[in-house]
Image (cartoon, rainbow, N blue to C red):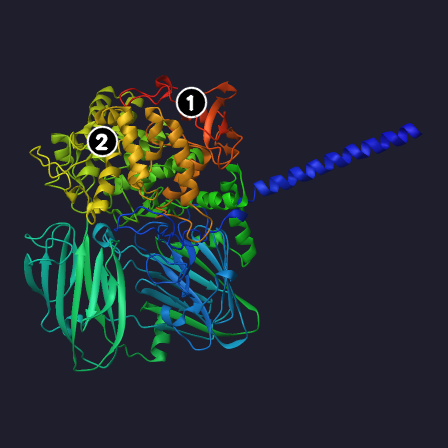
């Protein structure tokens, strides 16, 4: 009996221990599957305040916003603190509404197809500035699936959630006899139709102010919507849109234009002329005597007011613009940017004259300058209500009703780029209920499923930075496919098939797309299919579609995206078509509206892009050579030996733009002569101070990721390149937010000093990223900044996409696990890891000694375990021997 008693007690103890272990394991599993808890989407919404080496042309700002929606969603919804393209800035003190947005998160681009909705009580105010409410960041909750805020001026709690093409808003009102909701297009105007019987508003917002779409597609790129309300309307009406048709009548003498072949309006004008209106889109030069790029114009005119009252001036511009009224600066957007519309309102008196001056500069690509003045509108309330029922173009639409204390009013919005009927269909298919929490939970689960593919062991602060970065890496490009169709911004038609847009490929080929290869390989195939659909519909794979062609940036790095995927075994697309599109990039000049590789004919003939014929000649030459390397690698893998030999030879053309005297890039004319060693015309970014110029000369020189050994040989050997890199980093020429040289911290691996990469990468990660609102040191650039951080903190980086290898850095975390699509897991373990122990002492791969400073993609996909012993002092032998270094460009990489 006593024996049985002890046996029972022992069994109970065992069960209790097992139960505790099971409970702890379950709790760990819950934590591991709820990574969304670590994310704050406001990181990077404030300017970076840390150390930063920058050209004056770019500010250290993340350009991100706290958007809500699924991974790769067609639209997101975000609080709006400004009517500028970037919808949210931390420093702004008021919220103007909640914007359904297509702004590419983290890019210096333009908004398109936006729609903003704002709740308020009391006096009806319809303009964004008038209706804006104070708020406190302390009452904000910003996560990928849910955002909430208290609008202090109205005592309204606003909550947002969203899926891919639909969003769900919930407003908790106070008791009021005058509660309102206003909907508008913050960038221009829209078309609105109210159906009071169904508690619905439908319509579209156009693409006014956006460059490139009307001319390329035949119609403006519009975003259609259907908004369903949970509460009936007691009153509603439109807000009349500005009438710009009479602008010419207000300026009887037209506008005097003075054009300059510089961006500073300096010296004597190269052209003077009178224009009756200012309404231009220049795909080339504005006149035969004016530059295609890098020009400026000053327009002056005299406005004679026809009536008294509030007039609104509108200026749509590409790049920098300023507007003066009676010599007072009223619009100041003297910045390099995509096309957008600025406005300014003031009261004018009938019969009086006003001096108007508009100054504009064009950088590169297409140029846009449009000016209009809207006179006061005079429509009564009855007419505006009838217009709302019938549907009309307007600045805004508003509805009103009474609310009780803490009454929730819900709004569901479906969107489409095809038509209103498809917007309604998208809403019904994605949110066919009125359960706000249900939608928020579904989006949360989708994010957790995506985020749990990488597990890290680190502090809470580290997890906050890491998982916010991972979330940002899973936002773009956006999937705009709707029921198997898409509206094409390349031919203006509704087309069958897959489409993604907002590819910031010049940025994202470097690490964003390689990260997606590891985490989302099926989606990578979809993205490449979308690029090929763009090729079919417009003639080219795009460089920076947002949503259609733009001429932004230099190389055709879709070549790198495709080649990297193909080399790494992702081939679920038309590979022959893809290869043909790449060859077109490498041989054919672009058309009038799409330039592809600028100077490609001269590049093929001379072996470089001549400075006296083309802007950005240095980086074009180096990037064309890298793209040729990618074409060569894909040709080699496809068994196309002749093409491989041709393009691997062309991949070495970068040497032709490196000056044997200075060992830096240097301007070179078509006749082969070198320009001055300090001539800044090689790059539009190299103008400004001497430090600006040297900064870009030194950064661009390092862009030979496919032939680092060749670069070292040119400079005089490994030791010379090592000294160059030492000087480069020690004198703050490196900027982590500048894509030109994002790969450069890893270049020490190629020349026998990997321990310097280890130290440097840990320092850069720790000093340049934080968990606060100013936590990004520069533009997020559609996931590139974040993916650079993700790879770096895990301990390896794809220095040269198109090669199936990754350079090893210094893992920040004790353990990282990647769940691969093939069901296997790649694990990195760093023993004795700490802030001080940043140096690799030794390594093993699957238990066997590993001495290479790089790892092959196949080893990762095999589900291996890479272990490091870390220490406070460098082991200068590990990875440094010649046989353990990365192989040269002319040889295929062996495993």
- Give the class, few, some or many, for how many residues have Cα within 10 Å of label 2's Cα (few <14, many ≥20): many
Q: Residue at x 79, y 34 (%)?
A: 13
Measuring from the top left, give residue 580's x and y in whole percent. Answer: 24, 31
Label placed on residue 218: none
Residue 535 versus residue 568: which sits nearer the camera?
Answer: 568
Q: Residue at x 49, y 27 (%)?
A: 868
The answer to whether one can see residue 495 in this image is yes
The quarter in which the N terminus is drawn is: top right
Residue 552 versus residue 735: which sits nearer the camera?
Answer: 735
The quarter in which the C terminus is drawn is: top left
Q: Residue at x 61, y 42 (%)?
A: 30
Q: Residue at x 30, y 29 (%)?
A: 722
Q: Please identify the quarter of the rendering in which residue 515 is found.
A: top left
For marks 2 and 1, give the one nearer the viewer.
1
Measuring from the top left, give residue 597's x and y in whole percent. Answer: 19, 38
Q: Is 170 above or below relative to 365? A: below
Label placed on residue 625: 2
Sooner in the amino-acid sequence: mark 2 or mark 1? 2
Measuring from the top left, give residue 496's x and y in whole percent. Answer: 34, 43
**SS class, disc 2:** helix
Which residue does the numbered mark 1 point to in the structure image?
A: 878
The answer to whether one can see residue 707 in this image is no
Measuring from the top left, give residue 97's x and y in whole percent. Answer: 42, 64
Residue 576 versus residue 711: which sits nearer the camera?
Answer: 711
Q: Does residue 194 appear left or right of residue 273 in this picture?
A: right
Q: Does residue 114 appear left or right of residue 770 in this picture?
A: left
Q: Is 789 above or below relative to 265? A: above
């Amino acid at each position: 009996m006593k024996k049985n008693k002890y046996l029972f007690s022992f069994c109970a103890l065992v069960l209790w221990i097992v139960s505790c272990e099971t409970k702890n394991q379950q709790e760990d599993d819950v934590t591991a599957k709820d990574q969304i808890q670590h994310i704050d989407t406001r990181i990077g919404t404030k300017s970076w305040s840390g150390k930063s080496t920058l050209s004056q042309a770019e500010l250290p700002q993340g350009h991100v916003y706290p958007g809500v929606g699924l991974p790769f969603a067609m639209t997101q919804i975000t609080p709006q603190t400004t009517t500028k393209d970037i919808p949210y800035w931390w420093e702004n003190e008021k919220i103007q509404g909640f914007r359904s947005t297509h702004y590419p998160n983290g890019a210096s681009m333009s908004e398109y197809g936006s729609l903003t909705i704002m709740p308020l009580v009391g006096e009806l105010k319809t303009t964004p500035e008038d209706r804006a409410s104070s708020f406190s960041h302390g009452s904000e909750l910003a996560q990928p699936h849910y955002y909430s805020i208290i609008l202090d001026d109205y005592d309204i709690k606003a909550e947002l959630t969203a899926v891919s093409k639909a969003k769900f808003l919930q407003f908790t009102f106070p008791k009021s006899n005058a509660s309102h909701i206003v909907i508008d297009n913050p960038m221009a105007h829209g078309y609105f139709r109210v159906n009071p019987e169904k508690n619905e508003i439908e319509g579209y917002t156009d693409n006014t102010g956006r460059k490139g779409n009307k001319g390329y597609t035949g119609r403006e790129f519009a975003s259609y919507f259907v908004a369903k309300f949970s509460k009936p309307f007691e009153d509603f009406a439109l807000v009349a849109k500005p009438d710009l048709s009479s602008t010419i009548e207000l300026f009887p003498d037209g506008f005097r234009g003075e054009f300059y072949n510089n961006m500073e309006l300096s010296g004597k004008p190269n052209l003077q002329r009178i224009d009756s209106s200012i309404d231009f889109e220049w795909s080339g030069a504005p006149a035969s005597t004016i530059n295609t790029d890098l020009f400026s114009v000053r327009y002056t005119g005299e406005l004679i007011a026809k009536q008294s009252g509030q007039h609104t001036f509108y200026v749509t511009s590409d790049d920098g613009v300023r507007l003066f009224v009676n010599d007072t600066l009223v619009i100041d957007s003297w910045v390099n940017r995509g096309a957008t519309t600025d406005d300014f309102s003031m009261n004018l008196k009938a019969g009086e004259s006003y001096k108007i001056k508009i100054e504009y500069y064009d950088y590169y690509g297409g140029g846009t300058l449009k000016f209009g003045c809207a006179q006061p509108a005079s429509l009564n309330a009855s007419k505006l209500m009838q217009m709302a029922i019938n549907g009309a173009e307007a600045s805004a639409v508003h509805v009103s009703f009474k609310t009780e204390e803490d009454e929730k009013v819900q709004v569901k919005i479906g969107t489409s780029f095809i038509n209103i009927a498809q917007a309604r269909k998208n809403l019904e298919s994605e949110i066919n209920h009125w359960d706000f929490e249900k939608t928020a939970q579904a989006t949360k689960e989708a994010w957790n499923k995506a985020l749990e593919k990488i597990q890290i062991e680190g502090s809470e602060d580290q997890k906050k930075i890491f998982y916010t970065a991972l979330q940002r890496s899973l936002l773009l490009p956006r999937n705009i496919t709707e029921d198997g169709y898409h509206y094409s911004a390349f031919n203006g038609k509704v087309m069958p098939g897959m489409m993604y847009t907002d590819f910031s490929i010049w940025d994202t080929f470097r690490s964003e797309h390689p990260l997606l290869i590891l985490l989302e390989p099926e989606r990578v195939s979809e993205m490449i299919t979308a690029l090929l659909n763009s090729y079919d519909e417009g003639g080219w794979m795009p460089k920076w579609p947002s949503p259609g062609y733009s001429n932004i940036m230099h190389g055709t790095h879709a070549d790198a995206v495709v080649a990297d995927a193909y080399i790494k075994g992702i081939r679920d697309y038309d590979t022959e078509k893809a290869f043909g599109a790449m060859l077109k990039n490498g041989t054919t000049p672009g058309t009038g509206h799409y330039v592809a590789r600028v100077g490609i004919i001269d590049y093929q003939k001379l072996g470089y892009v001549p400075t006296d014929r083309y802007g950005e000649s240095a980086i074009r030459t180096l990037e064309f050579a890298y793209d040729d390397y990618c074409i060569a690698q894909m040709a080699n893998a496809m068994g196309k030996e002749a093409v491989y030999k041709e393009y691997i030879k062309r991949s070495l053309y970068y040497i032709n733009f490196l000056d044997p005297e200075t060992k830096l890039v240097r301007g070179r004319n078509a006749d082969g002569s070198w320009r001055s060693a300090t001539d800044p015309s090689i790059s539009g970014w190299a103008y400004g101070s001497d430090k600006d110029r040297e900064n870009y000369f030194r950064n661009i020189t390092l862009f030979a990721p496919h032939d680092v050994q060749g670069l070292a040989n040119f400079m005089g050997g490994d030791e010379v390149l090592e000294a160059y890199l030492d000087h480069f980093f020690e004198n703050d020429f490196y900027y982590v937010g500048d894509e030109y040289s994002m790969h450069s911290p890893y270049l020490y691996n190629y020349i026998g000093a990997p321990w310097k990469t280890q130290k440097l990468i840990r320092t850069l990660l720790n000093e340049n990223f934080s968990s606060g609102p100013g936590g990004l040191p520069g533009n997020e650039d559609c996931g590139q900044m974040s993916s650079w951080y993700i790879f770096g903190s895990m301990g390896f980086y794809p220095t040269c996409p198109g090669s199936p290898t990754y350079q090893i850095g210094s893992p920040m975390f004790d353990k990282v696990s990647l769940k691969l699509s093939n069901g296997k897991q790649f694990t990195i373990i760093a023993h004795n890891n700490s802030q001080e122990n940043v140096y690799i002492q030794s390594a093993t791969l699957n238990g066997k000694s590993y001495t290479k400073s790089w790892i092959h993609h196949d080893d990762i996909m095999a589900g291996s375990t890479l272990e490091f012993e870390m220490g406070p002092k460098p082991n200068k032998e590990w990875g440094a021997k010649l046989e353990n270094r990365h192989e040269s460009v002319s040889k295929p990489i062996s495993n």
